[in-house]
Amino acid sequence: MTEIPTPAITPINQPYWSGLDEGELRYQRCGACGNAWLPAREECPRCLEDDVTWQASAGRGRIISWVVYHQAVHPSFADRLPYNVAIVELDEGPRLITNITAPVDELAIEQPVVIRIEREADVSIARFAPA
Amino acid sequence: MRGRTVIAGTGHTAFGKLPGRTTDSLNVEASRKAIHDAGIDKDVIDAVFVKYPTSGHRSMYAQTVSEALGLQPRIGGVWDQGGATNISMISFAAMAIEHGQCEVALVTIADNPKTGTRQAYERGWGDDAVYGWFGVAAGYAMIMRRHMEEFGTTHEQFGAIARACRRHGAANPHAQLRLPLTEEMYDASRTVIDPLRRDDICLVSDGGAAVIVMSAERARQLGVPAPVPILGFGQGQTSWEVAQRPVLTETSAAVSARTAFAMAGMTPGDVDVAQIYDCFTIAALMTLEDYGFCKKGQGGQFVSDGNIELGGGLPVNTSGGLLSETGMPGMQLVIEGVRQIRGTSVNQVPDASTAVVSNQGGIMHTHSTLLLGQ
């Protein structure tokens, strides 16, 4: 059985993953221009300044789009088929790739969702459920 | 610089499963055929542009290809815009020629993901792989879903693109998949990553293809038998990952096309035939919208109304496209554009005088546009 690939934790993204371990979804905000984003990076992609701080999200957002895998592209997900992957936009602005913990017929674009932190392959990850 | 450079010759290998062939050899075979088609001596080539093979990246691969071709070019190199690379290399070659950096450019691609590795198409997306987020196809499925939900685009409409490409490819003796697709077959097609069905997804192919670019004046001097003028080109780079794009259903294909049409002094209404990059049906549909052949959101109606068929207002992918001729990234579409302007296509559009060709790469990350015509 192939293992599920786990995130490569670096000094840059470590606050994100440790935040999830502590029950908190964190995103980055620029102290210079106020831009908010994920995934973690070292400079603001809008104003390019390096005044980057971590903030806690309220954990609410909406579905931008989603897909349902009926064929496993990676063998470690073969026993979960079919499974969904979605793009969620947080109320604070950042977007992320996630899974929605709901049947496919409950998924819709602009559907409000709320975070549900779960353990996967020994890592805490940010899944969402319909709000 | 409309019409000042030409595509002087084209060549390609067989498409499909080519076990035992290296990308070096496929590049040389395609180049040899393009040189013969242009009716030139190899030694007039002074620029070599090469697309990197996805099946096996090698540093400074253009130098490897140049050695295999017995050439020491003035300029060239490997360019990486994924599937947008070929038209972009043709446009950089044209600009280099215009500015005296070279005179005759060979632009070539070869890849063998069918017998080699498809890893480039199936890899996980960084840390998001923990959510099961793998593969190029899934990114297109994400965009396709948004288009369907936002504009009411249907599977039946996406199927119209697949059916047109497969019908056109069935008449092409070089096509890898020559089986026409019926509505029933498309409906029965297996869902791979919902909403993508098997028949929305292009072929995987080994093969090589090449073109020769030079100035129209040089083509006259060298007695090139059937030069096809380059009327315009452009590029656009959406660049950001799918999850980060503020709008999923629009891409920089629009910028690319605007640039090309402005250079040519033309509008979409001037185009007689189109070769539109169809790695996935959603890519072709959105390109038709972004190019201005129909309004945003009306691509489904446009393709299901028969416009893209032979005899329609804008015949698309007359050699079968990536869905039928070969899954190779893009040069085959340029070659079919050249055939249409020369009047030598197996699915010739009568009196075609202007052809548009699109190339795009990644998950609509990059785009390039070429206008050819007499």
Image (cartoon, coloured by chain):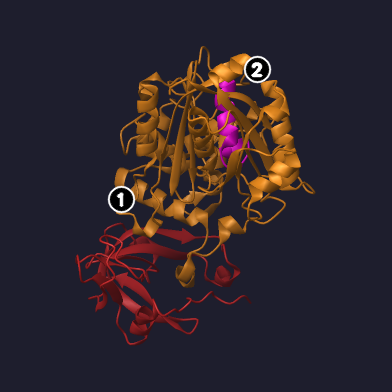
State the extent of the magenta-drawn residues as a range.
B322-340
Q: Which residue is mark 1?
A: B247
Share a chain, discs 1 and 2? Answer: yes
* Foreground tag (1 vs 2): 2
* Residue closest to the eye, B82 or B102: B102
Q: Which mark is residue B222?
A: 2
Q: Position of residue A103 (x, y in %)?
A: 39, 67
Of all residues shown, which one is farthest toward the bottom?
A22
Q: Looking at the colours in the rendered structure, which chain would you say is drawn in red? A: A
Report x, y in % for residue B208. Answer: 68, 39
> Who's the residue at 53% across and 74% down the image?
A5
In this view of the protein, can residue B168 be seen by the observer? no
Chain for disc number 1: B
Chain for colour orange: B
* Looking at the image, residue B206 lies above or below residue B181: below
**Image quadrant assignment for residue B251:** top left
Q: Secondary structure at mark 2?
A: helix
Q: Is residue A14 left or right of residue A72?
A: left
Question: Which sits in the foreground, B225 or B175?
Answer: B225
Q: Chain of mark 2?
A: B
Q: Is residue B209 visible?
A: yes
Q: Where does residue B200 sit, x and y in percent of width and height?
A: 52, 44
Q: Earlier in the sequence, mark 1 or mark 2?
A: 2
In the picture, the quarter occupied by the N terminus of chain B is top left
Q: Secondary structure at mark 1?
A: loop
Crowding at label 1, few (<14), some or many (≥20) Cα neighbours within 10 Å? Answer: few
Amino acid type assigned to the residue bearing label 1 in the image: Val
Q: Is residue B71 left or right of residue B243?
A: right
Residue density around tag 2, few if under 14, some if 14–19, many if 20 or more, within 10 Å: some
